[in-house]
Image (cartoon, helix red, strand yellow):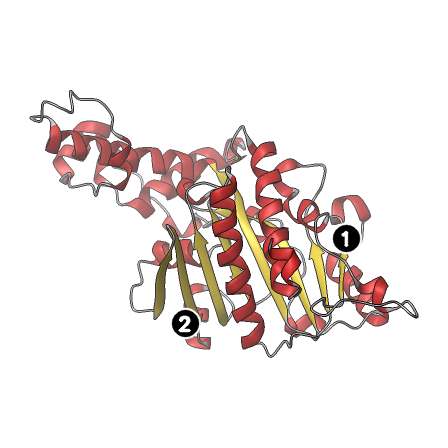
Amino acid sequence: MGHEINTSRFMLRTDLISDTITSFGISDFKMIKESIEDINVDRITLDLKQAELLNKKPGNYITISFEDITDSSNQNKVINVLSNELKQILKINNIKDDDTVLVIGLGNSKSTPDALGPKTVENILVTSHLFKLDNTDIEVGFRNVAAFIPGVMGVTGIETKDIILGILEHNKPHCLIVIDALASSTIDRVNKTIQITDTGIEPGSGVGNIRSEISLKTVGIPVIAIGVPTVVDAVTIVSDAINYLYKNISYKKETINQASSKLKINENYLNYKSNLNPTEKQKLVGIIGTLNEEEIKSLIFEVLTPINYNLMVTPKEIDFLIEKLSFVLAKGINNCLHQNKQLNL
């Protein structure tokens, strides 16, 4: 080509463990996969060596994947799965049914893709104040839960971790549940994935605006992070489009002689594995067809970054989706933390 592509310059913009493992092309991790009513659940535990290899924190990661969150039936399915998985990760971290919990909604409520945390906290069933009142009868099954929205440093001028530490000095919960919007390195996962981890969180890491870590190490109590990818960068969109082109052409090659296809684009082609050889790829997209996936992303990154066009992008219906997702997260958290049967009606 006359130009060497520096793949080391490309920074993977993702908070998802599943994206990271795929990007590194590693397959020897022990992952438990389960399908629950059309919802896929992947569970993985990273030891220290594996975590260092992936530049992640050691601990437990749960990835819940779904196709639709807009109708009540699918919402209830995701809520049930989320609630059950959250119960398990709390149990792993020795959080008892009557332990107090502080729910933190990270993000900027004035920026819709980043408003997932604050929106979710608005629907959390807060009971902490009731436990502090005298002569108040609290039904069996309700846990002592408090919630807070710390805002972002660009608005408050204060590091989020420092705000949380200030709260912990006066209110001493046994556990933190932190909710935040994430970034994904694949279009397929945007607004269709929930990640739960007990490794804590680095706010803003997916978009390169890293703030101080919030974890057991920094705040002194277990931190369960729940996130949904709501944005993806321009490099990912362009590289994914090239991969989709390969898949579409591969699908057409297999179905071109079938009368029913009539060369129409079938939605199933997205699940179709590309079987184009290097020569066919080069005919489609020229010299780019000779590059592997990492080289393509690095080249696009190299082209877009100097002109500040490596944008973070979100779907046009993000307002609607954030409302649905925040409802699902809040309902799932409420059902997990409070064991009162009336909440599950």
Q: Position of residue 279 (x, y in %)?
A: 12, 35
x and y percent of residue 180 in the render?
A: 62, 51
- Residue named by callout 2: 50
Q: Is residue 122 left or right of residue 234?
A: right
- Horizontal side of 318 relative to 249 (left or right) equals right
Give the answer, above or below, for where 333 lies relative to 3: below
Q: Callout 1, which amino acid?
A: Pro
Q: Examine the image and state in which quarter residue 281 appears.
A: top left
Closest to the observer: 4 or 94?
94
In the picture of the structure, the residue carrying the numbered disc 1 is: 150
Q: Is residue 176 visible?
A: yes
User: Residue 268 location in percent, x, y?
Assistant: 26, 36
Q: Residues within 10 Å of mark 2 (few under 14, many from 20)?
A: some
Q: Which mark is residue 118?
A: none
Q: Give the CA distance from mark 2 to mark 1.
A: 33 Å
Comparing labels 2 and 1, the label whose residue is closer to the camera: 1
Q: Residue at x 46, y 35 (%)?
A: 234
Query: Which SS class for mark 1?
Result: loop
Q: Residue furthest left?
A: 257
State whether residue 15 is above or below residue 268. below
Q: Residue at x 35, y 37 (%)?
A: 239
Q: Residues within 10 Å of mark 1 (few under 14, many from 20)?
A: many
Q: Residue furthest right?
A: 134
